[in-house]
Amino acid sequence: MNDLSAERVSALLTTRRFGRSLSIVSETGSTNDDAKRAARQGALDGHVIVADAQRAGHGSHGRSWSSPAGTDLYVSIICAPRVEAALLPQLTLAVGLGVALTVEEFANERASIKWPNDVWLRDKKCAGILVEGMSSGSRTSDLVIGIGLNVNRTDWPEDLANIATSLKARCAKNFDRARVLASLLQKVETQTDLFFESRGLRAALPAIRERLAWRGMLVRVDDKSGTLEGVDETGALLLRTETGLERVLSGTLTRA
Ligand code: BTN
């Protein structure tokens, strides 16, 4: 964990808020769960929790997030602006753009955003995002932005081997996790600030659309199939089906 000490990360930070209060632990259950607990106990906006390994990292749809020690980044950011729960899918895409820009900086190639919460390099996933709202009615109080980014990993369990990649697996060299983390926090802070200032995705939408995976291709979202045409300002996927253009708000996207 030498490359991931709080001192090194703090020295590299260029953010205003994200990571200015920072906790890096060697192992935990889930950094998102820790961040939710910390938020309830009054942790500050921008407080970041990073773990070298997670025992129970989780992703969307209750899936687990494989989180071994020594190679990757498991990061959760407490974000205080109050937004309606309905805005969380849009915010996930804005965060996805920040993650994609970070991946591009280090991999030196275009990353894609696979709706709604993955970042891919070429044809494999290298990062996942899980934004969780701590809701009270339709408003959310604190948000937790969870990001798992595969940095130096080259081995995956059998079920992930064909669908997962990392910066190292693509570029055949090791990356300094502290540098990747500092850049990630800067880029995600920039995108979330833009999102909250303009109360939505409008500013980020052109860059998201340029990076959207499988545009123009035949895809499925759960039991619906059609041609993927894009995303709209609400973060909905636009699918051209037999019956016309449909807005899809959630689901698992696959190639048809
Ligand atoms: C997904 O692809 O479904 C989202 C995966 C999100 C994983 C990250 S790792 C850090 C944070 N802690 C968690 O338990 N989950 C997120």
Image (spheres, rainbow, N blue to C red):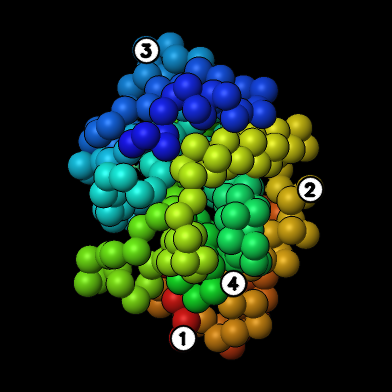
Q: Which residue lies at the image location 65% right of the left edge and 41% below the top edge?
A: 187
Query: Mark 2: is the Cβ under 8 angstroms from ligand 1?
Result: no
Q: How far, Cα to Cα, is label 3 from label 2?
A: 33 Å
Looking at the image, is 191 positioned above or below residue 124?
Answer: above
Q: Position of residue 39 (x, y in %)?
A: 42, 19
Mark closer to the observer (4, 1) = 4
Can you identify the residue that label 1 sits on? Answer: 256
User: Label 3 is placed on what type of residue?
Assistant: Gln
Q: Which residue lies at the image location 60% right of the left edge and 64% below the top edge?
A: 111
Mark 4 vs 1, N-terminal side: 4
Q: Which mark is residue 41?
A: 3
Q: Quadrant of residue 105?
A: bottom right
Q: Position of residue 193 (x, y in %)?
A: 70, 33
Q: Position of residue 154 (x, y in %)?
A: 34, 64
Q: Which mark is residue 213?
A: 4
Q: How far, Cα to Cα, is label 1 from label 3?
A: 45 Å
**Left-right relation of 195 to 114:** right
Closest to the observer: 200 or 212?
Answer: 212
| Residues at marks 1 and 2 touching, judged by CB atoms closer than 8 Å | no
Q: Secondary structure at mark 2?
A: helix
Query: Mark 4: is the Cβ under 8 angstroms from ligand 1?
Result: no
Q: How far, Cα to Cα, is label 3 from label 4?
A: 39 Å
Q: Secondary structure at mark 3?
A: loop
Q: How far, Cα to Cα, is label 4 from label 2?
A: 19 Å
Can you identify the residue that label 2 sits on? Answer: 203
Closest to the observer: 138 or 34?
Answer: 34
Q: How far, Cα to Cα, is label 1 from label 2?
A: 31 Å
Q: Secondary structure at mark 1?
A: loop
User: Label 1 is placed on what type of residue?
Assistant: Ala
